[in-house]
Amino acid sequence: MVSVTPDIIPFVSPIKANVLTQTELETVKEKTLQLLNDVGVHFPSPKALDIFTEHGAQVDRANEIVRLPQDLVLAAMSTAPRSFILGGREERFDLLLDGRRSYLSTDGTGVHVIDAYTREKRPSCKEDIAMMARVCDALPLVSFFWPMVSSKEYGHTAPLHNCHASLINTLKHVRGGTTVHPRLAHYFVEMASVVAGSTEERIKRPPICANICTISPLSHDKHGIETALIYAEAGIPTSFMAMPTMGSTAPATPLAALIMGDAEVISAMVLLQLAFPGTPVFHAVFTSIMDPRTGGYISEVPTPSYIMAKQLAHAWDVPCLGGARVSGDAPELGWQSGFEVGLGAGMIAIAGAEICGLMGLVGSATTLYPEEVILDHDSIYHVYEMVNNKRFDEIDLALDVIRKVGPRNHFLAQKHTREHMRHFRLPSLLRHRGADGVQRDPREIALERFKHIEATHHPQPLPEEVLLELDRILERAEGEAERIFKE
């Protein structure tokens, strides 16, 4: 039985926070330009080096270092679109990245799962992605599905299977593309074309986007860059994500780490704009901290770092992925994860990034508790209603009721009360009591709700001929991967 996927709810907040003044923001951009011109970025790709050479960059081929003059950077970035559409399977799930609203995303890509039924920790698999895509399809605040874990059983072709499992199990936009061997990248484009219905529709309303991570400090991955060029030629929107870690792969100050990450991201965006002017790109810098006691990874950084990253993306006049995140460093569900979710949910209200939230994982985005996405969604919904609960058109009616009741009375018997009380959404995970009247553990209720959605929500399937063609694409990709890794 096919279920109806609810309309998505974008996060529109009247509150917007900025940390840097306009003058400070221009100074930060100037420092990025200085790094690109004076220090340069490592591009271990002959294709990238050829493109930069053709356009007048300073290319040191022996060391694969590219230095980018300011005029070249500014001219290339001027061709990047400020807004574009990330397509859903239906137009009502399209995401317009224009800065007016934030769309919430799942987090990706973990490697461990706490099984919803056995509660054992195990490696993730393709069925976990399919399961989470179907559940998130039913959650209206989830607008953008990033495969939350990996199809580890498929090895080199796992990213293709991640994309496949997502596309066939949700009507929402999918973060499908990632770094693979360049000879496999074309299969992502084929899948996007088949789901969109045509090449023209894929370009107009791409059903997938891609994410390519940089390598801090100031470097890129050869396959990542060459894969990004293939996505750009096909019109697949691509974000570049820098993840500098203060103290190890980045300076131990937030602004310096941000500037270095920005240089990595902008250098890649410049490459794509030089090769394919106007190709859609978006910006992501997530700074982190090295634990000085253990050398471990701490993803939670002071709030201003997220806001500064969002401001910097918008200063370059491109959309932003970031600004807030809900997933954190807690190794399991408990006090720490609840604190991090609450803080992250509040951050969404002030972030202002086009894609933000990044919900549903713990352990620094490594581990999936299936019920965590229900807990996150409930917390974020509470914040959403806090910042959107204003109805000026009802003021006069409310004053009439106050006049009618007068001093020292109550509103229980008023029609106004009966009509409007039902509009309030009480957080059911926090106030649910059992038959014995004892308040239940929200985690227990969340797991029950997850299991119910997983068992009953079945989004509109793709047409049979599309499903068969996707299977054929995967079969060809598997054969290509076998040839690649035998050579």
Image (tube, rainbow, N blue to C red):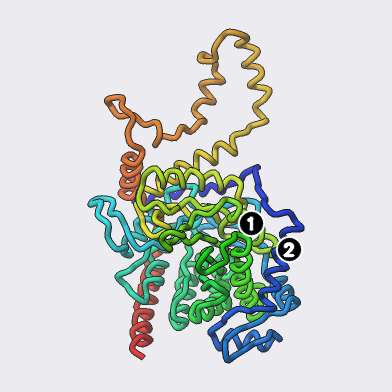
Res 41 quadrant in image: bottom right
Secondary structure of the residue carrying tag 2 is helix
Residue depicted at 35% across the width and 73% down the height: 471
- Say the numbered circle drawn on residue 38: none
Q: Nearer the viewer, residue 227 or 453?
A: 227
Please name the residue shown 55% across and 77% down the image.
219
Q: Which one is nearer the viewer's eye here, 128 or 303?
A: 303
Q: Residues within 10 Å of mark 1 (few under 14, many from 20)?
A: many
What is the count of numbered marks? 2
Residue 446 lies in quadrant:
top left
Q: Earlier in the sequence, mark 1 or mark 2?
A: 2
For the point 42% across and 54% down, which residue is it?
A: 329
Q: Nearer the viewer, residue 243 or 251?
A: 251
Tell me whether the residue at label 1 lies in contact with that at label 2, contact meaning CB atoms closer than 8 angstroms.
no
Q: Position of residue 341 (x, y in %)?
A: 46, 46
In the picture of the structure, the residue carrying the numbered disc 2 is: 27
Q: From what the image shows, is residue 383 above or below residue 263?
A: above
- In this view, the residue farthest toward the top is 408
Q: Amino acid at mark 2?
A: Thr
As drawn, the residue found furthest toward the front would be: 293
Tell me the SS state at disc 1: helix
Q: Which residue is mark 1?
A: 308
Q: Classify the position of the C terminus by image quarter.
A: bottom left
Q: Residues within 10 Å of mark 2 (few under 14, many from 20)?
A: few
Residue 432 versus residue 356 in the image, above or below = above
Q: Nearer the viewer, residue 405 or 256?
A: 256
